[in-house]
Amino acid sequence: MRDGTPAPTGLGRRSRRLSEEETERRMLDAAQAMVNRTGLTVSLDHLSFEDVIREAGVARSAVYRRWPYKDLFFTDLVAELARAAIPSPADNAAILALIRKVVAEHTDRLATGEGRHSVVLELFRQAALYDFQTLYGSPQWRTYLALHATFDSLADGQLRDQIQRTLAESEQGFITRVAAAWQKVAELFGYRLRPELAAGYDTIATLASATARGLILMALSTPELATHQTTAKPFGATETRDWSLPALGLASIASAFLEPDPTVSWTDDRIGAIRHSIDDLQLPGPADPTAPTAGPPGS
């Protein structure tokens, strides 16, 4: 320059050095902005292709002939996970034992409307918590929920569409089974859908499933939700008991959609038939997509 001052250089124009805290904040903000634009993605980074080969006990050369690149294998794996992660109910034998136990302990209450209502509420109270705790601890269910939440982020459009179709089919089969179970239990205890709601058992099954899944997701980060109990006498119950959040949620759905069927005549024969029906009740597993699952919990 004319006054003898040297012209500024690139080094002279450089920004000041950021502190460690500023660097951390900028990195986190930038990454969060990127995630907000694109969404979280399905990740299998914790799986090593070589570890899978060793676990499978197969020849490495045969594997690479089938999948020349590990990304091809992981694409097939995601599709397989979607097919395998079909929602299944809690252990059928345990749920059956619980239903039979509740009915056996309260057979004397079946003669009155109030008594039958208390039996159904007690069934909800116990079965909903058992079902929730079983699914909450199930890795299969966590995979299923994760696939639902993240499949849309898959880069491969064909794979993404395939996963969506698979999840939709498994979801429909699950809702169908749960709806059939709700209907079976409702009719057994003399309840019907409230006609003014113009809703079917599939609506109940959908809402019950959404309630349970929401609580499962929340409990993953807030584990105390899984054990939280409220001492109460809700929904016309005759006794004060400890109620879990899943039980409160599902019983509230049942109370909203179901009412005693006025056309049902409660004779001694019918009351006796309830216990007989419970003793003969069989709950098929998820292999039969049209059959009912474990009853009213419906998670």
Image: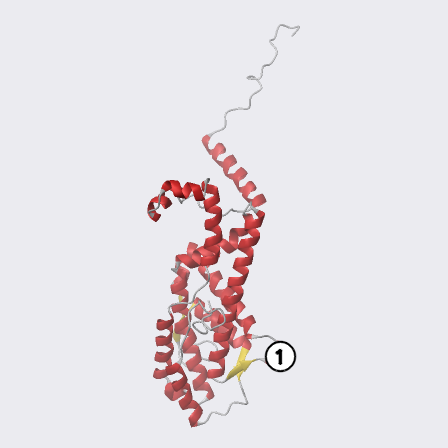
Location of residue 11 in the rendering, given as x and y in whole percent from the top left corner:
55, 17
Judged from this view, the residue extending furthest toward the bottom is 268
Location of residue 260 in the rendering, given as x and y in whole percent from the top left corner:
52, 84
Whether residue 43 appears in this view of the structure is no
Whether residue 112 appears in this view of the structure is yes
Colour convention: secondary structure
Say what amino acid the circle numbered 1 marks.
Answer: Glu
Q: Which residue is mark 1?
A: 196
* Residue at disc 1, secondary structure: helix
Location of residue 284 in the rendering, given as x and y in whole percent from the top left corner:
42, 72
In terms of image quadrants, where is residue 98?
bottom left
- Residue at 49 percent across and 52 percent down: it is 79
- Residue at 38 percent across and 40 percent down: it is 61
Q: Is residue 91 left or right of residue 193?
A: left
**Between 146 and 32, the one nearer to me in the picture:** 146
Judged from this view, the residue extending furthest toward the right is 2
Q: Is residue 65 above or below residue 146?
A: above
**Between 288 and 154, the one nearer to me in the picture:** 288
Location of residue 36 in the rendering, given as x and y in whole percent from the top left corner:
56, 45
Q: Is residue 295 left or right of residue 101?
A: right
Q: Residues within 10 Å of mark 1 (few under 14, many from 20)?
A: few
Q: Is residue 64 above or below residue 149?
A: above
Count of numbered circles in the view: 1
**Between 274 and 167, the one nearer to me in the picture:** 167
Q: Is residue 32 above or below residue 214?
A: above
**Between 27 and 91, the one nearer to me in the picture:** 91
Q: Tell me the quadrant of the picture where the N terminus can be found.
A: top right
